[in-house]
Image: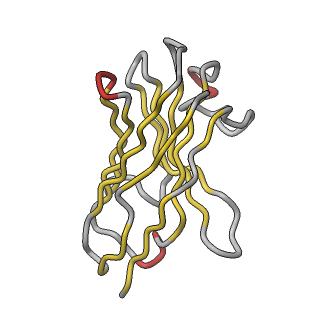
Amino acid sequence: QVQLVESGGGSVQAGGSLRLSCTVSGYTYSKNCMGWFRQAPGKEREGVAAIQTETDSTYYADSVKGRFTISQDNAKNTLYLGMNSLKPEDTAMYYCAVDPFLSGLFCTGVYRGTYDYKYWGQGTQVTVSS
């Protein structure tokens, strides 16, 4: 059974930093697309960043570009999201997700979002105060 567990969320002041982690277990596929999403109360879920594990190709939403960094540690089966210069509008529940079949343009390119990820974590809350 595939499980994704996020950690690292918390409360910080604007301008601060956090690093989210997502540990994946029970996943036997060799290829995958991994991503971070967020959802604030009353808003739609937003794709924040994604990474194609074979190529290290990445995608960032315009709202986080230059501030957030997605990375992976295959040896630890862990996905990270480094978040710097945090803003109050970054406040949301953050979720990680993994899919064994999304790749290329469907992972980090123009077709991302066409298909939903297969596996999701439960989320970790990030709160940024002004």
- Residue 60 is situated, as x and y percent measured from the top left of the image, at 46, 46
Residue 44 drawn above or below residue 80: below
The residue located at (30%, 51%) in the rendering is: 82
The residue located at (71%, 75%) in the rendering is: 42
The residue located at (61%, 42%) in the rendering is: 120
The residue located at (58%, 29%) in the rendering is: 2
Q: Name the one closer to the observer, 75 or 34.
A: 75
In the displayed image of the protein, which residue is found farthest to the front? 1
Q: Name the one closer to the observer, 49 or 120.
A: 120
Q: Quadrant of residue 114?
A: top right
Q: Name the one closer to the observer, 121 or 71.
A: 121
- Residue 70 is situated, as x and y percent measured from the top left of the image, at 37, 42
User: Which part of the image, by quadrant, shows the N terminus?
Assistant: top right
- Residue 59 is situated, as x and y percent measured from the top left of the image, at 47, 39
Q: Quadrant of residue 103?
A: top right
In the displayed image of the protein, which residue is found farthest to the top? 30
In the displayed image of the protein, which residue is found farthest to the bottom? 130
